[in-house]
Image: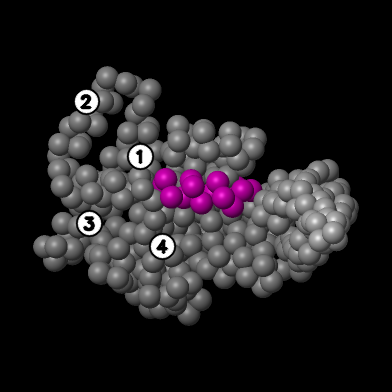
Amino acid sequence: MRMTSWSPLMLFVALTTACGPRVETRTFDLEYLSPEEVENLIVPYVFNENARLSIGTHAVSVRETPANLDQIALVLERYDRPKPGVRLHFQLIRANGSERTDPEIAEVESALRKLFRFKGYDLVAQAIVAGVEGSQAQQAIVAEGSGTEYSISANILDVQAAGDSGTVRVLVNLFVEEVGTALQTGVNLRVGQTAVLGNVQPDPQSDTIILTVRPEFVET
Amino acid sequence: MNCTEARERILEADLAELQETGDSLLSKHIRLCVGCRGVAERILREELSLARVLSEVRPRVALERALADQRRTPGGRRRIWTRVVPALAAAGLAGVLLTRAPVIPMGGRPPMSFPADALPQTPTVDPPLDRNVVVFESDNPNIVIIWFY
């Protein structure tokens, strides 16, 4: 008699244990994230038995527990947004220049003076280019004094944003008239951080040129 | 490329690929995948640490061995130099710091001094193929000096 009364309960426990937690399927629309980015973001939330994940170009379907689906929804809402535009500030600085400090390069000059023993530093040209991830921007500039023509190009390879902060990976190319490419390098920077790219010497007779680059996010 | 394939290839990849700047499938994957990027960054850090230790212990032996290897395997030249030259540079910097050598002005080359708080950090930069790089962090956290030589 006692065995009979417990049987339904045991059957229920056995069934729920065998089936695992309740899962359901939900499809999320995607606008900006790539399939690889989506995978990296939501795989950590897809782990239960019977969970499934199917990623398309503009949507992702997930079979998971309601709680995990809610978490995935929050993650996608936070990150599936247009990436910000990037504005890159370039400065060309000539080493062995004036001993007078130029306010526009004061911070950079202070850092350089702690490392190098050049007599001074002159700002010879500035440029600002803007773009978005995957774009290329270029600007020609002429150095004050010498009249040397430079061309700065920037390939914005990657933009990672979280609120106002983030990082930008950019491939920088400095082209000098009648010399060719004087510097080409990739650098990954925090937004607001200035990279001082040093020791560009277009030819043995010329002064050392230093290129700085600072990324900022801009509204697109 | 999925993470399993990427992590198999990471172990044999050229350092330039690990620095996320190449166009290979592996570089693209590393750029996008946080987990694999972490593995790649760890390998790069270990490479740098290993180079430093080698240079501090027996730089000349390391150089001679590298040059001998280079002569035997011309195809591996770039990879060898990417390891040995930073190691020797680190040894040189360590020497300057330890001996507190005075700064000597040089002709066309930038005369350098190395304060203790400006030791080279792990590069966040992909240098040009024919040059090496030292990365200095300054007192100002918003300024990083990347010097090619």
Q: Would residue B57 be found to the left or right of residue B38 on screen?
A: left
Q: Is the residue marked by circle 4 packed among few (<14), some (14-19), or many (20+) residues within 10 Å?
A: many
In terms of depth relative to the viewer, which is nearer, A198 or B86? B86
In terms of depth relative to the viewer, which is nearer, A8 or B117? A8
* First in sequence: mark 4 vs mark 1: 1
In the image, which residues are magenta?
B31-44
User: Which label sits on residue B93?
Assistant: 3
* First in sequence: mark 3 vs mark 1: 1
Residue A71 colored in magenta in the image: no
* First in sequence: mark 2 vs mark 3: 2
Q: What secondary structure is marked by label 4?
A: strand
As shown in the figure, which amino acid type bears the numbered disc 3?
Answer: Leu
Name the subunit of mark 3. Answer: B
Query: Do the residues bearing badges 4 and 1 touch, measured as CB atoms within 8 Å?
Result: no
Q: What secondary structure is marked by label 3?
A: helix
Residue at the (80%, 57%) spot, across then down: A3
